[in-house]
Image (cartoon, rainbow, N blue to C red):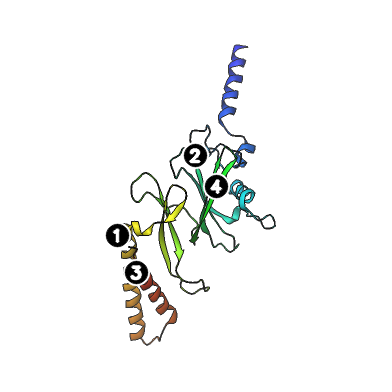
Amino acid sequence: MRLLRDVLVLITLVCSVVPSRAQSRDVQSADWSVQAKPSVVEMGFDKNAVAAFVNSLVGDPEDPLTANQIGDFKWLDVDKDGVYELLVTYDVTKRAFFGGPAIFKSIAGKKRWHQFLSGWELKELDGAIEDLDRDGLPELIVPIRLSEYRGARPIAVWPAVCKWNGDKFVDASGQFRTFYEQRVLPEIEAEIRRLTAEAKQRQQTSLGYDEVMDERLAVAGWCGIRLPG
């Protein structure tokens, strides 16, 4: 009897730690606090659960998001208040044009907050979250469009740095000159040199004027002179 009692106690303890399938699907009613056991990070939410949560908060009931329209999601305590935020990239076009991120917060399943950032072609959040100024709070590096979308034509895209201001994320690119000088502009300048050399080579081989290449060069130059501050 004692062995059976010990086994039942062990089963009870395991069940109290491991989330049930029903629990793992319900983002809205979960405890988003960092100290929760299990935490939302540990509960194993999938894209179906995230899509259902987004639909419950801001979705269109006639055209709800599906799991395929969720690009990536991460749990992160962006303001270090002990409650996780949920960052989500999403596609409302159904053409795999992912944007965002959207940032959501839920406290005790009741008080909710959200913000949408207008990122372009941002599917994965890896590389978009970094504490650039080492103040303990992460910045979001969000690719924004500088030119209009025109199908296969080149688009000028610029990595804006968004910083938490105590209430929301705001564009603070002008505060991160070193980031642009050391990590962004060298790549753009290298692309300008490559495109310039390619254009000269095409002229020398009599391949003719390439409007798309010229536009790509103009776009690279446009980005290159857009140094904040």
Q: Residue furthest top?
A: 1
Residue on which the image places disc 3: 224
Q: Nearer the viewer, mark 1 or mark 4?
A: 4
Q: CA distance from mark 1 to mark 2?
A: 33 Å
Q: Are marks 1 and 2 in contact (CB under 8 Å)?
A: no
Rendered residue at 36%/73% (across/down): 221
Determine which residue is flagged by label 4. Answer: 113
Q: Residue at x 44, y 61 (%)?
A: 143
| Closer-to-camera residue (211/108) | 108
Q: Which mark is residue 83?
A: 2
Q: Badge 4, how many Cα within 10 Å: few under 14, some, many 20+? A: few
Residue 179 to residue 111: above or below: below
Nearest to N terminus: mark 3 or mark 2: 2
Circle 4: residue type: Trp
Tell me if residue 95 comes above or below residue 81 in the rendering: below
Whether residues under marks 3 and 2 lie with C-beta atoms below 8 angstroms apart, the answer is no
* 68 versus 113 height, above or below: below
Circles 3 and 4 in contact, beta carbons < 8 Å: no
- Mark 4 vs 2, N-terminal side: 2
Q: SS of the residue at dot 4? A: strand
Mark nearer the viewer, 1 or 2: 2
- Marks 4 and 2, how far apart at CA: 12 Å
Mark pair 3, 4: CA separation: 36 Å
Q: Residue at x 58, y 64 (%)?
A: 95
SS for dot 2: loop
Q: Which residue is mark 1?
A: 182
As drawn, the label of residue 202 is none
Q: Where residue 226 sits in the image (x, y, percent)?
A: 36, 68
